[in-house]
Amino acid sequence: MSKSYIGKLARINLSTGEIKVEKLDVDLAKKFIGGRGLGTKMLYDEGVATVDPLSEENKLIYITGPMTGTRAPSSGRYKVVTKSPLNNMIGCSNSGGVWGAKLKCAGWDAIIVEGKAKEWSYINIEDEKIEILPAKDYVGMLSVETDEKLKEAHKGCRVLNIGPAGENLSLLAAIMNDKDRAAGRGGCGAVMGSKLLKAITVTATEKVVEAHDEAKLKEVNKECLKMIKENGVTGGGLPTYGTAVLVNIINNTGSFPTKNWQGSYYDKADDISGETLKDSYLVKNAACHRCPIACARVVDVNGKVCGGPEYEPLWAYGGNCDLHDLNAIDEANMLCNEYGLDAIGTPCTIAAAMELYDKGFIKEEECEGVPLAWGSSKAITEWTKRMGEGKIPLAKLMANGSYRLCEHYGHPEISMSVKKQEMPAYDARGIQGIGITYATSNRGGCHVRGYMISPEVLGLPEQLDRTTIEGKAKWCMIFQDLTAVIDSMGMCLFSSFALGAPQYAALLNAGTGTEYTPEELLEVGERIYNIERMFNKAAGMKPEDDRLPKRLVDEPISDGPSKGMTTKINITLPQYYEVRGWENAFPTKETLERLGLAE
């Protein structure tokens, strides 16, 4: 057995209580690396693409990558792979912290959860021992309190759990771990809730996962750490200001969406920037497992020390809701963590609701005392809480995302989403390549499945002109494929600001004994992206699902440095399909055969 792959997984059936230990198919693992790639292939092979996402037939795969828990830098990531109830497509959400590394150190590459418990339960893992225990005492608890109570019951454990949003089957429900880390997108928390699974605790005796060649890994690590330290983003901007360093950077390009994407420049952006967050609210930095970057923020929110906001919720609660009250944004972000809500989808849905309210589609009486007014601090905190609780009618509707909310009021065009998932904090009119990423993301509107902001704005690995479309289809494909590799290895995407395919190949080869060239590794990423697309095809995806909101195509940016720009997705999408070897949004037979996916 190759080191870095433990070689086994657990299959847990909540309906029957049966727990089976299975061998990892190492040959298959190497074909898809692990994590995101292997999890998707397993889900596809087990026929989950055609099931109801909230039925007993759906499955949750909590899966590590071969580098998770090793001495590699930023190697704390795990994936939750399932069928998304938000859009009925592949649901794969990524989280950091320590929980994933502990699962691997406990001796498990993955755990597959099937069926539905007869009563609220949680899974307790202590190295080789796995048991299903009653969770009735934890139902209704906020996520942070659940974490603390389970740590009292299982000394030394790490906790993954859902908050009230997941219990209520909100389609924006996240899965939380280590209190403020989230597998946030696609409604995976609702799938946990549908199975009456409140939490998974992990206690591990081992501290690190051994690599195939520890001496070689140490050598490669040294090179990678030097590159990370010397890089201006990973060695400077992110440690100093967190991801919120992007607020002023993106705003200065005129690509910082405001008022639900009606504008793209916010004149009060500095009030909610990473610099202001650091000066006014930062308590300390925090880091995931073996991370040299330490970009996470720990902040003081009205006397409570907790995890602080990333760039996306700062934007989404801030400029996108026309609000520059940083204390209220910190509080709303904290409420997302406590209730277990997606901190992108939730504020973006509030912004859509604000536009619906502003235009008279949502009536005053529906707001039950808290108007959804632009720039209202009370609105963002109270409606986040209401969405988490899911009690009043409008809040229940909002808790299922902006697409269903806007469709309910007869104006789906107001939802700034792709495949029913809200887009994050970069206007695709002002940054052309990120629009291709949004439109073609297999899990819906997403920036971290091909982070074109890196070359188009940050100039890494080279500076591209954000306003042009030339060559962007090919660049997008490369970034998507490399990201699939990084996600599947169990490493953090942020390491890619400093590292490239040669470094990832060297890390993986030292960890597992493989002999990938950088080119071969990118081909594995391409295979992963294509198997995700085939899952979506089996799930009923249509070619027209690869699209951007009408606003971005038809309405030029009204203000700021990118004034007058629209997305050129109608030109770039056919170019993208050509470089991918796809026709009408799906892989051709020849492409599948080339990637070993013909079956």
Image (cartoon, rainbow, N blue to C red):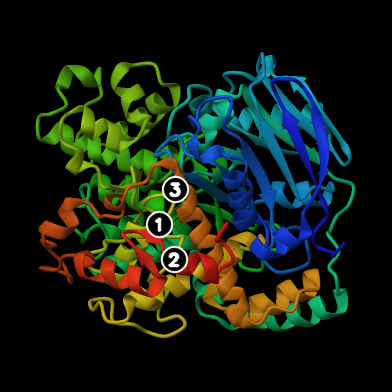
Q: CA distance from mark 3 to mark 1?
A: 11 Å
Q: Amino acid at mark 3?
A: Asn
Query: x, y percentage for residue 530?
Result: 49, 61
| Residue 128 found in image quarter | top right
- Determine whether label 2 and label 1 are within 8 Å by CB: yes
- Residue placed at 69% from the left, 38% from the top? 112
- Which label's residue is closer to the chain start, 3 or 1? 1
Query: x, y percentage for residue 529?
Result: 50, 61
Screen quadrant of the C terminus = bottom right
Q: Which numbered circle lies on residue 441?
A: 1
Q: CA distance from mark 3 to mark 2?
A: 18 Å
Q: Nearer the viewer, mark 2 or mark 1?
A: 1
- Residue placed at 26% from the left, 63% from the top? 428
Mark 3: give few (<14), some (14-19) or many (20+) Cα within 10 Å: many
Residue under label 3, please give it: 536
Screen quadrant of the N terminus = bottom right
- Which label's residue is closer to the chain start, 3 or 2? 2
**Left or right: 416 in relation to 199:** left
Q: Which numbered circle lies on residue 450?
A: 2
Query: x, y percentage for residue 364?
Result: 16, 21
Against 99, residue 122 (above or below) is above
Label 1 residue SS: loop
Mark 1: give few (<14), some (14-19) or many (20+) Cα within 10 Å: many
